Image (tube, rainbow, N blue to C red):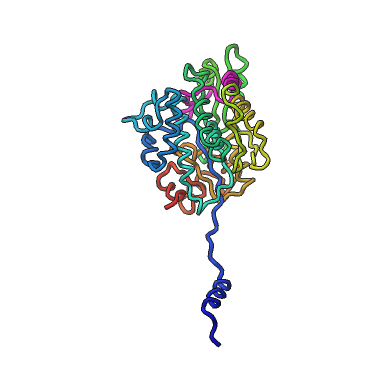
Amino acid sequence: MILDTKAQSAANDQATPVKQTVKKRVVVVAPGRGCYNKDELGYLKRFHQDKESIIANIDRFRGEMKQASVTKIDGAAKYSFKQHTPGENASALIYACALCDFMDIDTERYEIVAVTGNSMGWYIAMACAGALAGKAGIEVVNTMGSMMQDGLIGGQLIYPVMNAQWQLDENLSSLVERTIATISDEDGCELFTSIHLGGYRVLAGNEAGLKRAETLLPQIDEKYPMRLYNHGAFHTPLLESISEKGFGTLSSSLFSKPSIPLIDGEGHIWTPHSTDIAKLRDYTLGKQVLELYDFSKAIQVAVKEFAPDKLIVLGPGNTLGGPTAQALIDIKWFGWSNKTEFSEAQHSLPKMLAMGNEEQRGLCSAE
């Protein structure tokens, strides 16, 4: 008996299962201010010349605001603190770099299960997740980033609260808390915790409060406490006027339900099906501006709730890589309990990939 060849072929197809590549689950982390530095100059030109339409839309919006294009700022002959660090320039530039990086993630290899970010990175995360769609992303980022172009309100400094092995040091944490309490009791001084940033504490306050903190906090590595240049008192009550301006300027129509789950600075998850858009706007322009941003908690909630195989930290730069790893070490995620274990694991089978690192970038993007 001679079998029909087509029938035989169909039978063979049914008998032999098609091999499919199982996607790795990833949480994407968006950076905040301070990640575009001298080494990142030309980031858009190096990595994103194929994103002309996206960058052009950002430049067009900034042109309408009478602001320099991100193309021009990124393409400057040399890095300048005066040009590259003010909020009205840094915010849009970092947004452009990070959003384009997000678009380069190879979705044939990776399933993006959640997105989070640090500080300004919350706005970027919202754009990546679809909660700020299209032009809304640059409008929110650029508007909030430009609020203090006529003068900063307060400032920020950063101080480590960990040991050399990236383990949280309770003594240092207690010291920072006592210092904040002492300064806050002094006339004319205001000081708050602004961000829990892995093994660092970002403090924000008025000039008097920051100067007292620089006096009272012991020097570490001849580097800390370190002032963050051109940073206002983000995530503190000092920015009440900025929050009010945000509510008055940015309409509800800019906000949408995310298409990917979002984790905010309180560790709250905003899902595609349950997000109340009005509440999302209220948080973004209210609490997110005026209260502590707990980046460490956001990372820890993200891995506990979504169990990713890896985390991808968007560029530019890789300043957020350390704090992300430190937040994971704090809960012994991926079996990491110290910096040595993290470093060894990264060399053998990396679980955290930074797109600002050219070697790791190739592991994130499509070939």
Between 1 and 309, the residue placed more toward the observer is 1
Q: From the top left corner, tell me how far across and down residue 27 is, in percent.
A: 56, 45
Number of numbered labels in the structure image: 0
For this orientation, the residue located farthest to the left is: 77
Q: Is residue 16 left or right of residue 104?
A: right
Quarter of the image where one finds residue 18:
bottom right
Span highlighted in magenta in the image = 217-245
Between 26 and 66, the residue placed more toward the observer is 66
- Asked whether 230 falls inside the magenta stretch, the response is yes
Visible in this render: residue 297?
no
Q: Is residue 76 left or right of residue 205?
A: left
Visible in this render: residue 124?
yes
Q: From the top left corner, tell me how far across and down residue 49 is, in percent.
A: 38, 41
Residue 230, above or below 276? above
Residue 239, above or below 362? above
Q: From the top left corner, tell me how far across and down residue 110 is, in percent.
A: 52, 51
- Asked whether 336 falls inside the magenta stretch, the response is no
Q: Is residue 201 left or right of residue 60?
A: right
> Which residue is rendered at x = 51% and y = 44% of the image?
339
Is the magenta region chiefly helix, strand or loop?
loop
For this orientation, the residue located farthest to the bottom is: 1
> Which residue is rendered at x = 42% and y = 36% of the image?
55
Q: From the top left corner, tell me how far across and down residue 107 is, in percent.
A: 51, 50
> Which residue is rendered at x = 42% and y = 31% of the image?
59
Position of the N terminus, as image quadrant, is: bottom right
Q: Is residue 279 left or right of residue 200?
A: right
